Amino acid sequence: MSMIRPRPCPICRKNALPAKAGEKDTFPFCSERCRQIDLLRWSKGQYAIVEPLSQEQLEEMQDGAGPEAAADEAE
């Protein structure tokens, strides 16, 4: 008996279980097909991570320096 409770696949809502030994792990998706559908949606921009930007972040974007440049300068 599995100790992990099945979770619904975020694409098709079927139960998605972690892979058994020797199987390809597609968790949290139920199959490779659902994993690929999710990847396609991200690549088309259908999903977005939205968070409010601070004034400092807005100024960095306007100056053309992204967060990576600010991190490099801090080192």
Image (spheres, rainbow, N blue to C red):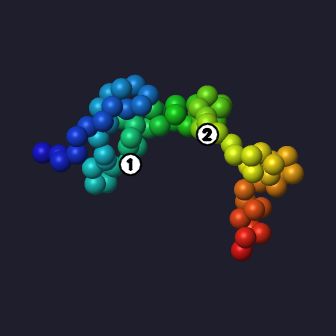
Task: Give whichever of discs 1 and 2 has the lower sequence position.
Answer: 1
Packing grade of label 2 (10 A; few <14, some 14-19, many >=20) is few
Q: Quadrant of the N terminus?
A: top left
Which disc is residue 24 wearing? Answer: 1
| Displayed quadrant of residue 73 | bottom right
Q: Residue at x 42, y 31 (%)?
A: 10
Give the residue furthest to the bottom: 75
Q: Judging from the image, what secondary structure is the residue with disc 1 in? A: loop
Q: Position of residue 65 (x, y in %)?
A: 82, 55
Q: Position of residue 66 (x, y in %)?
A: 77, 54
Which disc is residue 51 wearing? Answer: 2
7 shown above or below 62: above
Q: Position of residue 44 (x, y in %)?
A: 65, 31
Most foreground residue, 59 or 36 = 59
Give the residue furthest to the left: 1
Residue type at the position of mark 2? Glu
Horizontal side of residue 63 vs 53, given as left or right: right
72 shown above or below 9: below
Q: Residue at x 28, y 54 (%)?
A: 21
Q: Residue at x 75, y 51 (%)?
A: 56
**Cα distance in 3D space between marks 1 and 2:** 33 Å
Camera-near label (1 vs 2) is 2
Most foreground residue, 65 or 39 = 65
Give the residue furthest to the top: 12
13 shown above or below 27: above
Q: Quadrant of the C terminus?
A: bottom right
Horizontal side of residue 33 vs 2, given as left or right: right
Q: Position of residue 6 (x, y in %)?
A: 26, 37
Horizontal side of residue 54 vs 40, given as left or right: right
Q: Residue at x 38, y 48 (%)?
A: 24
